Image (cartoon, grey):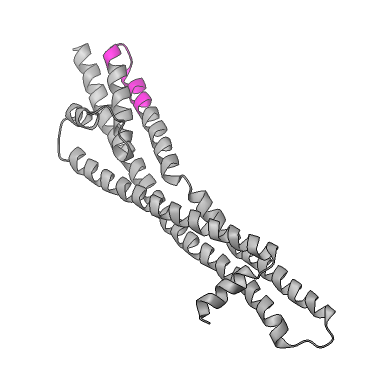
Amino acid sequence: MSGNMSIIELVLSASFVVQLVMALLLAASIVSWAIILRKRGVLKKAVAGSDTFESSFWSGSDLTSIYRDITQGGQAPSDMAGVFEAGFREFRRLTQQGSVPAVQVVDGAQRAMRVAQMREMDRLEHNLATLATIGSTSPYVGLFGTVWGIMNSFTALGNVQSATLAMVAPGIAEALIATAMGLFAAIPAVIAYNRYADKVTRLEVRYDTFAEEFSTILERHAHGRAAARQS
């Protein structure tokens, strides 16, 4: 009998509670890997999109041209381009009114960028809490299955006059499988959460820095337009 078949037989012969724990841990592992793979693509796209937009923004192109390029196609931009689009759209709306002071124009653009950034961060952080939950609780769920299985094994010894290792070994082995499955679900989730949380934090810093720099540019434009109207 192969080792794999032995493990399968142990799982199939486990008590209902231990099997339920194993099923929960298997489901948690599947959910965890689904989030890990999807979040990897989302963050990779966010970093690449921000790099591309920053290269275009700091190349000296006209702000109106950049705005027109990222809003083509009717689809709302995301990542750093989304922060720019929200701020510049509000800036254009307020400056077209003509009577809005320059300070209020810049404040309005900054508020729009903050809202867009908060939405973007919420999108990037989505499901990270699930990874943290799986990583922190899976070992304890597996430990519960282990304790329950070992308890059943020793309880069964009360019905026999002479106990042997062969009698308790299968029950202990099936119980320890629950611990292994708990670690199998928890370790990738914890590693991925730490890595992705760091990437999200770095992106947030980049968005904050860009918003401050862009606000300075908009402030110069707003005061320049106000001076031109007064002259």
Q: Position of residue 40 (x, y in %)?
A: 37, 53
Image point (83%, 82%), residue name: 160
Which of the 4 image quarters holds residue 196? bottom left
Image point (84%, 79%), residue name: 159
**55 with respect to 46 (left or right):** left
Nearer the observer, 56 or 16:
16
Nearer the observer, 174 or 140:
174
**209 with respect to 32 (left or right):** left
Q: Is residue 141 visible?
A: no
Image quadrant containing the C terminus: top left
Count how many numbered circles sit on residues in the image: 0
Which of the 4 image quarters holds residue 118? top left
Q: In this view, does 204 lie above or below 131?
A: above
Nearer the observer, 11 or 134:
11
Instruction: Name the main secondary structure of what is drawn in magenta.
Output: helix
Which of the 4 image quarters holds residue 100? top left
Q: Is residue 191 above or below residue 212?
A: below
Q: Is residue 200 visible?
A: yes
Image point (28%, 44%), residue name: 50
Q: Where is residue 113 in the image (x, y as percent from the top left)?
A: 36, 32
Q: Residue furthest front?
A: 1
Q: Is residue 4 above or below residue 94?
A: below
Q: Position of residue 120 (x, y in %)?
A: 39, 38
Image point (45%, 46%), residue name: 125
**52 with respect to 87 (left or right):** left
Say if the magenta span includes residue 169. Answer: no
Q: Where is residue 198 in the image (x, y as percent from the top left)?
A: 41, 55
Q: What stretch is highlighted in magenta?
A: 96-109
